[in-house]
């Protein structure tokens, strides 16, 4: 039997926030070293390739799917500005020297002009990528982070507030609060494959550890233009590994879901 979960975007009121999690905003300090791990899901215009790309970080990496030859190529490398230079790696993330992937990424639109080639010069192809779901006037956000430091173990710092800032006019459009999260990195990815990026935080409230693999989900609702928490997703243990080419989410431990019309259908 399939288990179905609605990727709910209704406004939520949380009554289970403990007093320990209610923090005076004046106690919070700005954090500047939080890494935003952004996953882009792109496909080539002719439909042959699908690219799952983590860019904007110090170690960009990607998986390229070739639907014609049913081939999967793992890539990692460097990014300088909008220029990507990636090389193919094996399952141990060691360069194998078979392929090189270079490209110019337009960060606002997500379009990518790329070149894929083999190291022996037997193959070279120009590829034009675009987002799988193209959204007109897609919001362009950056983030400001606030938290507490000089705390006791297990974590000396925690993330308590995330401000959503409109990059075009530098105004704060929303402040996310009411959580305790790991302060070193956040995920920024399209969880429900609707073309809008959602926010994933590592939940370290209630003495949880990173290894517990519990996450907080803030889903973007284009109708309200706000991020809203999803308690349904937060019940699932495991990090959401997105397989955009199949519209599937793998949380590990056999928890594989198909996304269909805003519903998570567990694949038994």
Image (cartoon, rainbow, N blue to C red):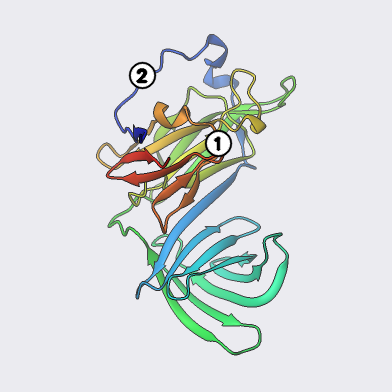
Compared across the picture, whether 4 is left or right of 95 comes to left
Residue located beneath label 1 in the image: 238
Mark count: 2
- Where the C terminus falls, by quadrant? top left
Compared across the picture, whether 187 is left or right of 265 comes to right
Between 31 and 228, the one lying in front of the other is 228
Q: Residues within 10 Å of mark 2 (few under 14, many from 20)?
A: few
102 vs 10: above or below = below
Kindly state the secondary structure of the residue where label 1 is placed: loop
139 vs 102: above or below = above
- Where the N terminus falls, by quadrant? top left
The quarter of the picture where residue 154 lies is top right
Compared across the picture, whether 108 is left or right of 222 comes to right
In the picture, the disc for residue 13 is: 2
* Cα–Cα span, label 1 and label 2: 24 Å
CB under 8 Å between discs 1 and 2 = no
């Amino acid at each position: 039997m399939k288990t179905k979960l609605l990727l709910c975007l209704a406004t939520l009121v949380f009554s289970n926030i403990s007093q320990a999690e209610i923090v005076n905003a004046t106690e919070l300090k700005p954090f500047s070293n939080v890494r935003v791990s952004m996953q882009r899901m792109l496909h080539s215009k002719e439909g042959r390739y699908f690219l799952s790309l983590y860019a904007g970080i110090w170690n960009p990496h990607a998986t390229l799917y070739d639907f014609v030859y049913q081939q999967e190529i793992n890539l990692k490398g460097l990014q300088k500005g909008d220029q990507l230079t990636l090389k193919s790696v094996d399952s141990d993330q060691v360069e194998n020297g078979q392929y090189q992937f270079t490209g110019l990424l337009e960060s606002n639109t997500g379009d990518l002009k790329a070149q894929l080639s083999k190291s022996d010069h037997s193959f070279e192809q120009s590829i034009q990528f675009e987002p799988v779901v193209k959204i007109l006037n897609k919001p362009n956000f950056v983030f400001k982070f606030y938290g507490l430091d000089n705390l006791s173990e297990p974590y000396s710092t925690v993330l308590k507030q995330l401000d959503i800032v409109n990059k075009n006019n530098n105004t704060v459009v929303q402040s996310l609060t009411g959580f305790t999260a790991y302060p070193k990195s956040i995920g920024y990815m399209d969880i429900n494959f609707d073309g809008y990026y959602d926010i994933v935080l590592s939940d370290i409230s209630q003495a949880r550890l990173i290894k517990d693999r519990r996450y907080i989900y803030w889903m973007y609702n284009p109708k309200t233009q706000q991020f809203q928490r999803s308690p349904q997703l937060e019940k699932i243990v495991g990090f959401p590994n997105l397989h955009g080419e199949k519209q599937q989410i793998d949380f590990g431990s056999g928890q594989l879901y198909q996304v269909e019309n805003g519903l998570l259908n567990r694949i038994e």
